[in-house]
Image (cartoon, grey):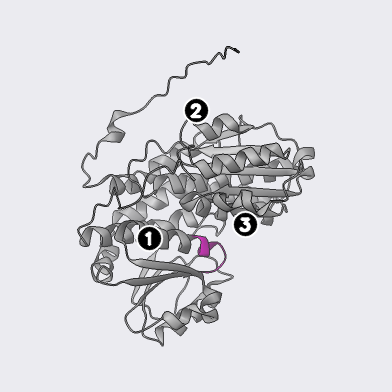
């Protein structure tokens, strides 16, 4: 019998995280904790005019140049976070990046090799499908990185490298601050890769500056949520909703739709705006709500065109944007601060989290513990 020695780890935990304090629900508390969670996740990793510091990694330019493909693997909300970083990894680093659902990853016999870099995301670090996918990638010789919010979790013990968000304990089943912290950490990782490779130096420096401004810009959104709450009161009576966006905004549409169905039990679907005419527009009828996200100036005019199509069919529109929408009328427009499209999901998702929250509250549902769901999915 082989004796295994394990080193104990002390994990500090603020007991106030397990209390609602002034808030009615943990979910609302965690929505409002996002500026703090993001500041903690950025920490000393990013500073203006300095290279990103990720002491957990020791990647060289030669290694990153040898990487032929990056796989980002996760489930649910974590997978939606993974989708947001592809724009940085492919746009700046020119490394082909694939986003996979962990529960499907193993069963499609992925073409993972020793030249692949595989990134696995799990808030709890205990998601069974994600851990199994990580083991498969390791068996094929790939380098693996785990991104988690829990120190010493199973996924971090399995991976070659581990990076932690510092969102603090998340009690509500529907993820909010863990999701935005994951996006921020993935953006930092993408910037780190770009700096190691020595590419797009001016653009990367500008992106770091904008990343540092994110917590303050979220605080601005949270100062006045009355318009969101008012729209939610009427939307709570509906049975269907659609979320659309293009490019990186489509990943936010996915997360917004997931939040709504998770806690309000309203059937909601997300689509890339350009896909509406390929089937989904048949479901648009008088009074149905379409939520549109527009943060990319190169794609806004195209999304507006798609939204005009649903308006002519009687849809109500709830828009989250930082773009100029002159000469276009929507039912409700929530404006967020200008920010690079590379990291805009960190801001544009906030109104969607609040929309789902207020709808659920109006329906008298248990926001923190939605039916049939668990915080961590530890079985396949």
Quadrant of the rendered structure where residue 160 is? Answer: top right
Quick one: label 3 or label 2, which is nearer the N terminus?
3
- In reply to whether residue 127 is colored magenta, the answer given is no
**Residue shown at the point (50%, 79%) measured from the top left:** 306
Q: Residues within 10 Å of mark 3 (few under 14, many from 20)?
A: some
Q: Secondary structure at mark 3?
A: helix
Residue 200 seen anywhere in this rendered image of the structure: yes
Q: Secondary structure at mark 1?
A: helix
Closer to the camera, 319 or 310? 310
Left or right relative to 377: residue 361: left
Closer to the camera, 56 or 141? 141
- In reply to whether residue 249 is colored magenta, the answer given is yes
**Residue shown at the point (46%, 65%) measured from the top left:** 322
> Residue 42 — which label?
none
What percent of the width, then of the height, locates residue 113?
Answer: 75, 44
Quarter in which the N terminus is drawn: top right
Quadrant of the rendered structure where residue 35 is? Answer: top left
Q: Which residues are magenta?
A: 245-251
Closer to the camera, 231 or 222? 231
Q: Secondary structure at mark 2?
A: loop
Residue bearing mark 1: 352
Quick one: label 1 or label 3, which is nearer the N terminus?
3
Residue occupying the far bottom of the picture: 312
Q: Residues within 10 Å of mark 2 (few under 14, many from 20)?
A: some
């Amino acid at each position: 019998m082989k004796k295994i020695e394990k080193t104990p780890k002390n994990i500090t935990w603020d007991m106030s995280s397990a209390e609602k304090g002034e808030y009615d629900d943990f979910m609302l508390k965690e929505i409002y904790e996002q500026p703090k969670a993001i500041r903690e996740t950025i920490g000393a990793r990013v500073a203006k005019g300095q290279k990103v510091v990720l002491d957990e990694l020791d990647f060289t330019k030669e290694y990153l140049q040898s990487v032929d493909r990056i796989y980002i693997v996760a489930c649910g909300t974590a997978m939606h976070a993974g989708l947001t970083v592809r724009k940085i990894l492919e746009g700046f680093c020119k490394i082909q990046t694939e986003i996979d659902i962990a529960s499907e990853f193993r069963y499609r016999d992925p073409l993972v090799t020793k030249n692949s870099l595989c990134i696995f995301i799990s808030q709890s670090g205990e998601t069974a499908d994600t851990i199994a996918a990580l083991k498969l990638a390791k068996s094929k010789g790939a380098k693996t990185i785990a991104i988690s919010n829990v120190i010493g979790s199973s996924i971090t013990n399995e991976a070659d490298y581990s990076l932690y968000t510092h969102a603090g304990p998340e009690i509500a089943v529907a993820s909010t601050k863990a999701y935005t912290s994951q996006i921020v950490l993935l953006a930092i990782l993408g910037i780190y890769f770009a700096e190691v490779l020595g590419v797009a130096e001016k653009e990367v420096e500008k992106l770091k500056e904008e990343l540092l401004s994110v917590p303050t810009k979220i605080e601005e959104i949270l100062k006045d949520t009355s318009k969101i709450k008012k729209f939610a009161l009427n939307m709570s009576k509906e049975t269907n909703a659609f979320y659309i966006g293009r490019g990186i905004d489509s990943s936010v549409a996915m997360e917004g739709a997931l939040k709504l169905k998770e806690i309000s039990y309203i059937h909601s679907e997300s689509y890339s705006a350009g896909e509406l005419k390929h089937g989904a527009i048949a479901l648009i009828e008088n009074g149905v709500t379409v939520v549109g996200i527009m943060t990319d100036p190169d794609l806004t005019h195209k999304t507006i065109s798609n939204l005009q199509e649903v308006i002519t069919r009687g849809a109500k529109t709830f828009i989250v944007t930082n773009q100029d929408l002159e000469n276009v009328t929507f039912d409700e427009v929530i404006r967020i601060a200008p920010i690079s499209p590379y990291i805009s999901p960190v801001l544009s998702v906030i109104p969607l989290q609040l929309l789902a929250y207020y709808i659920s509250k109006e329906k008298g549902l248990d926001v923190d513990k939605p039916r049939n769901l668990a915080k961590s999915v530890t079985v396949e």
